[in-house]
Image (cartoon, grey):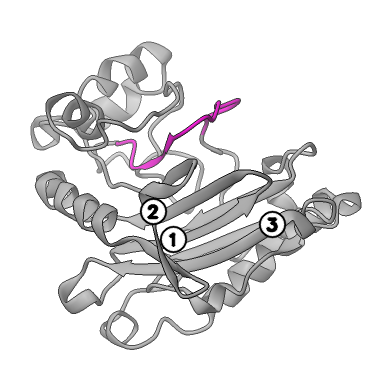
Amino acid sequence: PDSDPSEASKAWRSDADLIVVALQEVCQLSAYSILWSDGDMWKQWADWIRTSIRGALPEADFDLVHDPSLSRLVGLLTLVFASGKARPDVLAFSQCIVGVGFAGAGNKGCVGVRWQLGRRKWCVANVHLAAGTAAQLEREAQFDTISERLEFLLDGEVVPADSHDISLFIGDTNSRLVGADDLDAEIVVAEVASAAGVKQYLQRDQLLVRRLETTYFHDWREAPIHFTPTYRWLKSRPQMDPKRVPAWTDRILWKGPLTAVLYRSLEWLEIS
């Protein structure tokens, strides 16, 4: 991160007991990072986010409830913070990695975490799926692999991901628009700036379309999308890349007794 942590202060809710941050692509990809190590960039991100949360909510005494170094996939970082009040009640924490790249290597896959808070058992899957409009079937296969292989070891026993009361699937689904190759990127960028454009192009969203046609996320819920696409923004200035067809790549879906209070993108947060 190359900006002041205070820039993210508006992202943190003052009434929260838990804050879960799921990041993808926290390092520069190279042959070395994909096959061997992604270095310590994740530490810089973890420190940056901790500083941001503590600066915005100093009285809540937020801190990590786990050691994120124990479950990392190239570029993926999952951080679970709890307030000082809630931290003693976060029990049975466990972590798991599911790689879906060649031989389990690469930056595609899932970093999963689970815990118990009160009577509720929570599971969060931070994912990064295959990129590209033509890779939708590959993404669906990766989703199936993650669903089948995501499990946790707790007190010597295996705990399947689907045994939890509340499950969240968070991250870069890389969902693109159906027929994106036939669309003019500049026209789409201009049209999705309006609510009508968002509604129009969401009808082409691969994730939403395939949920209706297949078992891909068919029993998961997602809050209504009213924000502009999260792909692809220019790093140098707050506008979308006119050379890339926009898409809602970054999503949050869930199962269980959960209500979404707010679902949005943070267009004002310009860090990378």
Residue 73, quarter of picture: bottom left
Q: Position of residue 122 (x, y in %)?
A: 53, 48
Q: Position of residue 195 (x, y in %)?
A: 42, 14
Task: Give the CA distance from mark 1 to mark 2.
Answer: 9 Å
Q: Do the residues labelled 2 and 3 touch (CB within 8 Å)?
A: no
Task: Give the CA distance from mark 1 to mark 3.
Answer: 16 Å
Around disc 2, counting alpha carbons within 10 Å, would you say few (fewer than 14), some (14 to 19), or many (20 or more)? Answer: many
Q: Read off the magenta span.
A: 247-264
Going from N to C along the chain, the mark reached first, 1 or 3, is 3
Tell me if 61 is positioned left or right of 156 in this view: right
Q: Nearer the viewer, residue 19 or 40?
A: 19
Q: Nearer the viewer, residue 87 or 76?
A: 87
Q: Are marks 1 and 2 in contact (CB under 8 Å)?
A: yes
Which label was assigned to residue 136? none
Residue 248, quarter of picture: top left
Quadrant of the rendering where the N terminus is positioned: bottom right
Around disc 3, counting alpha carbons within 10 Å, would you say few (fewer than 14), some (14 to 19), or many (20 or more)? Answer: some
Which label was assigned to residue 112? 1
Asked if 10 appears above or below 26 in the picture, the reply is above
Asked if 209 appears above or below 134 in the picture, the reply is above
Q: Residue at x 20, y 38 (%)?
A: 216
Q: Nearer the viewer, residue 75 or 102?
A: 102
Q: Residue at x 21, y 58 (%)?
A: 145
Residue 21, quarter of picture: bottom right
Asked if 257 appears above or below 83 in the picture, the reply is above
Task: Give the CA distance from mark 2 to mark 3.
Answer: 18 Å
